Amino acid sequence: MFLENTVVLSRMQFALTALFHMLWPVLTTGMGIYLVIVEGLWLKTRNSDYYYHARFWSKLYILNFGIGVATGIPMEFQFGTNWAPFSEAVGNFFGSIMGFEATWAFMLEAASLGIMVFGWERVNPIIHYIATILVAVGANMSTFWILVANSWMQTPAGGKLVDGKFIISDYFQAIFNPFMKVSILHMFFATLETSLFVIGGISAWYILNKRNAAFFSRSLKIVIAAVILVAPIQIYIGHLSAEQVYHRQPAKLAAMEARWQTIPAGESADYSLVALPNDKAEKNDWELSIPNALGFVLEFKQKLSEPVLSLKEFKPENRPHLVGLIYYSFRTMVGIGFALAGLMLITTLQWLRGKLSTENITEQKWLLRAWLFAAPLGYIAIDTGWVVRCVGRQPWTVYNQLRTVDSVSKLPPSNVLTTLICYATVYTMLLFAALYFGSRIIRKGPNLNLPIPGIESQPALDTKPGEFVPDERPVEAQQ
């Protein structure tokens, strides 16, 4: 039974902590860039709307940062508690990369965050802007180092395993391993796209409820302008990532495609759209495919330049299981990517038709509801993508070098089950707390009475701090 298996329980615990933790830095890495944009626009134009946008969205940034710290530290502790043999075997490289993430990235972000949050009226606006930039750089540098470490686990380079320990002979070759560049770009654009659709979805909620529609139409338009570039780039980089798997991790590709029969090089193959994989019978019980499409998906051409190996080509102990999970996780990620790009295209067309002007935007209820529905989809795409990346790597922690069963600490299953239940309980509480405080920030809305640095301003006599103030400027000025 799986409850008596330390390996399975340790994998479940790491999956829980990793997938939950990932929800929070996803928004900070992308929203940090958005804050740099709106604060830069304020410094350039001195338009107060941009200043209030920076103040409002930074509240959600702080909330996500706090939950991210609270959930990230316990996750790294597991390398010493549940995965001690792994840490001992690859600590020469993996440990130093995690150290870089903590000292170079997290410390930079944390140190600059205090100035960004509390320095609006205490430091020069340029100094504050530099702090905001450093926060964004620190957040994205964390992504860089984490993806370096994980990419190295996917395609280990720069050394070899000697007597149970990975000895590094070329440190830079290990950092710039074959998966590194595309993996970092894929995750960078994933976090940015997710953050943009979250900001866009929240903005759509305000517009739907006719709460400062002119104010939030500005943030929605900034998001749309950015997504026009980000969404198609992300799809292309996703293709490059799949191409890497095709060339370097054939067992994972076989699981992603639920492929039970090898396709020789020089031939075309159908692309499996939906199927019911049967691991035990080593076949798909049923399947719906697109004829001769697999080559176009992998290489933009009909005939394959390399064979696509089937799962049967690998011994059962050397290939990933849970094929259905890998198969549908991949299709969920891809489907969401195309859905978000489709929403971007429709929204852009509506914008060009003049339907997103201040006078018309509140009438686009179906479009605004679509943006609201799309807000959480990026999170689902990222988590399912990581399921494909890590579950598809099995049975290896370091691909073809170190097995998962040899990486787990020798702990009693009852101990791991206890900590798993504790993590699940605490993380559930954190999730409800984050949803409560996040919804409270959104319901309260931006405080449009805040004094603007360098400008003498007083709150309106008939308003209270934090209360919404109708935008009474001329329509031309609002746009």
Image (cartoon, grey):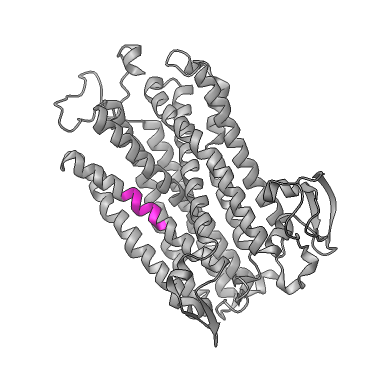
Q: Can residue 424 be seen?
A: no
Residue 22 part of the magenta-drawn span: no
Residue 181 against residue 34 in the figure, above or below:
below
Residue 111 position by quadrant: bottom left
Q: Residue at x 68, y 46 (%)?
A: 300
Residue 478 in the image, given as x and y percentages of width and height? 34, 18
Residue 282 or 230: which is nearer the viewer? 230
As drawn, which residue projects farthest toward the bottom?
163
Helix, strand or loop: magenta stretch: helix
Residue 447 or 239: which is nearer the viewer? 239
Residue range corresponding to the magenta coloring: 135-142
Q: Is residue 427 left or right of residue 135?
A: right
Q: Quadrant of the C terminus?
A: top left
Residue 196 or 184: which is nearer the viewer? 184
Q: Residue at x 36, y 31 (%)?
A: 444
Residue 322 against residue 365 in the figure, above or below:
below
Q: Is residue 315 left or right of residue 20?
A: right
Q: Quadrant of the N terminus?
A: bottom right
Residue 139 part of the magenta-drawn span: yes
Residue 417 in the image, given as x and y percentages of width and height? 58, 69
Q: Is residue 195 left or right of residue 300?
A: left
Q: Can residue 391 be seen?
A: yes
